[in-house]
Amino acid sequence: MKLFYRVGNIETNQGLWYDWEGRFTGLIHTRFDFCTNSNLPMPYDTKLVNWLSAVNELDNLWFWFSKEDVYELQKEGWYPYVYQAETWKMYDYDDQVSHPVIDQYTSKPILRIVINDSLEIGDIQTIKSTESGILTK
């Protein structure tokens, strides 16, 4: 088991580019275009179906989303999560961007990180298995 970090929705755990079915939502480009990397296209790639983009250290998450981004995203139900993953691999996009991806069916969110008004980590909440939002095959 290894720990990874990603931003996801509190109800569905989907990301800001794609939903759980692998369909492009574009939320990062429209509804959340204030985010640091809202111009990053993340085009559809069949090799990523059933995989979730993540980072292997919390500090790396702040490269993708600033703490200011996360603070604003929280108002809409999007939080940083700590995932426990059994299966992961590195994904290279266009020889420019490389990041870990975790299996969406075997990885489990175990902690939710809350950014406070001072833009610091204010709370770390344990995720109950009944609220994980993880899909099963």
Image (tube, rainbow, N blue to C red):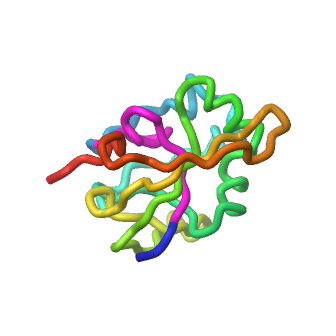
Which region shows up in magenta? 4-20
Side of 10 relative to 29 (left or right): left
Instruction: Name the residue furthest left.
Output: 137
Task: Name the spot of residue 67 as percent of width and height, x first.
Answer: 75, 43
Q: Main secondary structure of the magenta part?
A: loop
Residue 14 within the magenta-colored segment of the rendering: yes
Give me the residue at 32% from left, 39% from top: 23
Between 47 and 88, the one lying in front of the other is 88
Depth check, front residue: 61 or 35: 61
Q: Is residue 7 above or below residue 86?
A: above
The percent coordinates of residue 32 (x first, y second) are 61, 28
Q: Is residue 126 above or below residue 1?
A: above
Name the residue: 46% across, 59% down.
83
Q: Residue furthest right?
A: 118
Q: Is residue 132 magenta?
A: no
* Place of residue 17 in the rendered image (x, y in percent of width and height, measured from the top left): 47, 41
Residue 29: image quadrant is top right
